[in-house]
Amino acid sequence: MQTDPDEAIRAAAFAALDQLVLTHGPRLPWSAVDRGFRFGGEKVHFAGRARGIFKPRQMSAALSIKTVAPRAGRRIWYRDQVGNNPPEPDEPPRSPSPRPDYRTGLLAYDLARRGRQDSTNLALDEARRRCAPLVYFVGVSPAVYEPLSPVWVEDLDFETGRVLLAAADALDPTMSSIQAAQAGGASTELRERSYSLVAAKKRNHQAWFSSRTKSAYGHRCAFSGLPLPRLLVGAHILPDSEGGPAAVTNGICMSTLHHTAFDANLIGVDTSCRIHVARSVKDGRDGPLLDSLKGLDGTQLGQPDRREDRPGREFLDWRFQRFLETAD
């Protein structure tokens, strides 16, 4: 793995992107993305209008990739513009969503032009060689984008034009889901890289679930409103170990503190999204942090703006019954 001379400017880009999300919410109009950010006294662009892969002139490798949502009646050019399944002939084009590769659980992205002669392809491949993180701007409607970051290029095939992307590990956002799987002890070979396919697929699965859940909640803790993305997780309501699906309706965005309390059944949420606090917490006397948990009792859980992203009643009911059984 090479060092990344663009590391400082990438960090500035991610920090500026966090601020954009705080200001505009998880879905950014192109006008906000196009303003770019400041670094070293200069304006740096997040993405380009015309091309999907973007390398600012101040950088030596790609900073972002972009998928455009087609306007009604317009031609769909790339496989990653149709989400997981193509629309039926009489169905209007869907907003694109990250398209998983069935074997690895990674996200698939299509190059606009195949081959090593294209400069933007080479810029993306350079980011891959450095294991440098990027921003993935997913078009959710015309001129509106949902940023997923960071992502890493795990594989790039110049001949087929297919790129595979890994999300940040759900437990450690400083590394990709693949890097986390490798760190856990890898043994299986895929495209001449050795890592456990089973472990990697599970990490990818969790990483993308967490990313989508946090985005649905506007990158704010549903319990406290905390708006710091680096301290948030997308947590399952019904755990995947119990058969819970990796669907936003089975997730809640919460801070690491509230995640620990939720998993320990110290706080619970009923089917009307009312928060309950275990008696052991309410009876405790241990300073302002504990008081902040006590203060949640009887309040309402924050929910996504989109109704279809809100917690499923069946998941909340299952989890709340466990809370009632264990909370004292």
Image: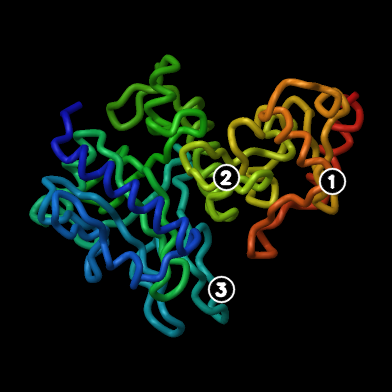
Residue type (three-letter) at the residue carrying disc 2 = Leu
* Quadrant where the image shows the N terminus: top left
In the shown orientation, is residue 137 left or right of residue 9? right
Q: Residues within 10 Å of mark 1 (few under 14, many from 20)?
A: few
Q: Residue 125, relative to residue 217: is it above or below? A: above
What is the CA distance from the residue labelled 2 to the residue labelled 3?
A: 41 Å
Element under label 3? loop
Q: Check if mark 1's residue and mark 3's residue have beta carbons within 8 Å.
A: no
Q: Check if mark 2's residue and mark 1's residue have beta carbons within 8 Å.
A: no
| Foreground disc of the pair 1, 3 | 1
Q: Residue at x 43, y 32 (%)?
A: 177
Residue type (three-letter) at the residue carrying disc 1 = Gly
Horizontal and vertical percent position of residue 244: 71, 39
In the shown orientation, is residue 266 left or right of residue 114? right
Residue behind mark 3: 88
Q: Residue at x 40, y 58 (%)?
A: 20
Taking depth in this image into account, of 109 and 222 the one nearest to the observer is 222
Horizontal and vertical percent position of residue 22: 47, 56
Q: Residues within 10 Å of mark 3 (few under 14, many from 20)?
A: few
Element under label 2? loop
| Residue extending furthest toward the bottom | 73
Residue behind mark 2: 226
Element under label 1? loop
Q: Residue at x 59, y 41 (%)?
A: 234
* Quadrant where the image shows the C terminus: top right
